[in-house]
Image (cartoon, coloured by chain):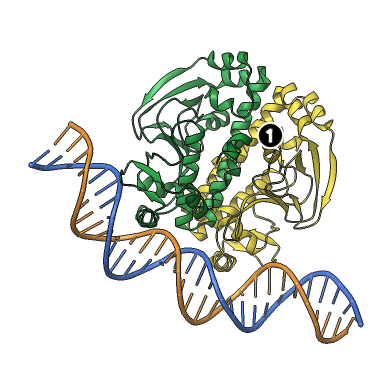
Chain colours: A yellow, B green, C blue, D orange
Amino acid sequence: MVRKLDYHIRLAEDDRAALLALPFRIRTYERYHFVIRERDVANHACVLLSGFAVRSKMVANGSRQIVSIHMKGEIIDLQNSLLNVADHSVQMLSSGRVAMIPREDLIRLAFERPTVGRALWTDTMIDASIFREWIANVGRRDARTRIAHLLCEFSLRLKIAGIGEATGYELPMTQEQIADATGLTSVHVNRTIRGLEKDGLIDRSNPRSILIGDWRKLAEVGDFDSGYLHLRDDEQAAI
Amino acid sequence: MVRKLDYHIRLAEDDRAALLALPFRIRTYERYHFVIRERDVANHACVLLSGFAVRSKMVANGSRQIVSIHMKGEIIDLQNSLLNVADHSVQMLSSGRVAMIPREDLIRLAFERPTVGRALWTDTMIDASIFREWIANVGRRDARTRIAHLLCEFSLRLKIAGIGEATGYELPMTQEQIADATGLTSVHVNRTIRGLEKDGLIDRSNPRSILIGDWRKLAEVGDFDSGYLHLRDDEQAAI
DNA sequence: CGGGAGGTTGACAATCGTCAATCAGAGTGG
DNA sequence: CCACTCTGATTGACGATTGTCAACCTCCCG
């Protein structure tokens, strides 16, 4: 988490130390367990220490929409906690550990140390930028493009976080979860993914991972422009 | 704007004064003019003083997605300015005035005065919450529900801002713009709106405004739950 | 009075969803 | 080791929502 916050706003040594000195409690969650549910009251900001998690919302007809996917090191529940009552659920995709930091301690730190505060605020902003891209993804792109876009985003974020390679990575999502993230049905996701495979863009011979044949080609199919991730210039250039 | 920031985080008199003392430059924009375009570098946070504006993104096939709609008093370009390079465009829906505050002055104030900082941060968070709801709206609801939801959100936000009534308001959007906000086509928006009219849910006898017959019924059709707007308890209760 | 933007409508096509059946693989208990 | 079960992937047939194309209409404004 410190590494991630340090990404845009350079943190001084004592800022890092203060972050690490925050009180916290660690909890382990099983796959598919909820860290928090819509409408609950949130008192803690949660940092994902291992595993993957999603944030999601339910709609009236019973279907759900995944609004973001998170990997280790990311802050998954700052938004709910600062707004007090949760407008979305946070659920584990795989088992993993979560550090829970009391809300007030984090807020105090944010304003005692402007650099930390600015880093947290920036993190919130980038979250919002990704939400905007997802609105466009779900609203204006066809199934093939949507899924390719999602795969590109995930591959790049994993690479930046030092968890995977751009050419392939472990994908902890079922096709139904991909459907919930892209606003499609699992059946259609299945067909679309098979189409991407047939065209040699991806390889799913191992059903729990993704191999990307030609990243640039997939990015083109997925109308993927990494600008919205607001990467640092050096990493932007390395894509 | 001060009024809006004061909404959740109670500002002291000197906090308000400091906000009002921020340097700014006022610009007037005509209808459809751009305040900022995707990929531009943003140096100013913009506050909408009058009129309406949208934020939007373009996708590869040439269509665009509106990701949010803004009314007077709202901060429309804080996100682009803090992230430096714009990931989306800001465009006027009607002519109006915009106050441009130098980014660094606003950031300095945010950390000099924690209360102001917390208010700005909260504003960012609520923006993000609305984005999440829009992802769900566009991803998982059918056309009728989507449009009804949009109309409900707009009506409520106008009411809270003291600009309109819940039962009816001026709607500065063409059907094509509604289409871009809901991920539909203007033709389908037209048909869907006519359907809502036929069922007596809304009245568009004046094409530039919306009259809502039965708010609760429209909210039900639109699967609208105001939780994601994070209203204050008193106003939440008054719905 | 002409031009243009936006609204309305119809016919038809395409994408995507629904329903349902089958299959493959992992874990479990006997 | 072998049923048994459960979850998730796969496939086909069919249907529904939504998009496309194109025409026409209605204002509003210079």
Q: Please state if A83 lies on the left or on the right of D19 as rendered.
A: right
**Residue A19 at x, y = what percent?**
79, 30
Observer able to see residue B232: no
From this view, report whether residue B199 is shown above or below residue B32.
below
**Residue B222 at x, y = what percent?**
50, 52
Q: Please state if B232 lies on the left or on the right of B64 as rendered.
A: right
**Residue A203 at x, y = what percent?**
63, 64
Where is the C terminus of chain A found, in terms of image quarters? Answer: top right
Based on the displayed image, in which of its 4 quarters is residue A121 positioned? top right
Based on the displayed image, in which of its 4 quarters is residue B196 positioned? bottom left
From this view, report whether residue B122 is shown above or below residue B209.
above
Q: Please state if B21 lies on the left or on the right of D30 as rendered.
A: right
Q: Residue at x 55, y 64 (%)?
A: A196
- Classed neighbour count for the residue bearing mark 1: other residues with Cα under 10 Å, few (<14), some (14–19), many (≥20): some
Q: How many marks?
A: 1
Q: Nearer the viewer, residue A214 or B139?
A: B139
Q: Which residue is mark 1?
A: A7
Q: Nearer the viewer, residue B188 or A217?
A: B188
Q: Residue at x 55, y 53 (%)?
A: A149
Where is the N terminus of chain A found, in terms of image quarters? Answer: top right
Chain to which the residue tagged by mark 1 belongs: A
Question: Element at badge 1?
Answer: loop
Q: Amino acid at mark 1?
A: Tyr
Observer able to see residue B180: yes
Q: Nearer the viewer, residue A175 or B182?
A: B182
Q: Residue at x 33, y 41 (%)?
A: B208
Q: Please state if A39 lies on the left or on the right of B145 as rendered.
A: right
Q: Nearer the viewer, residue B142 or A222?
A: B142
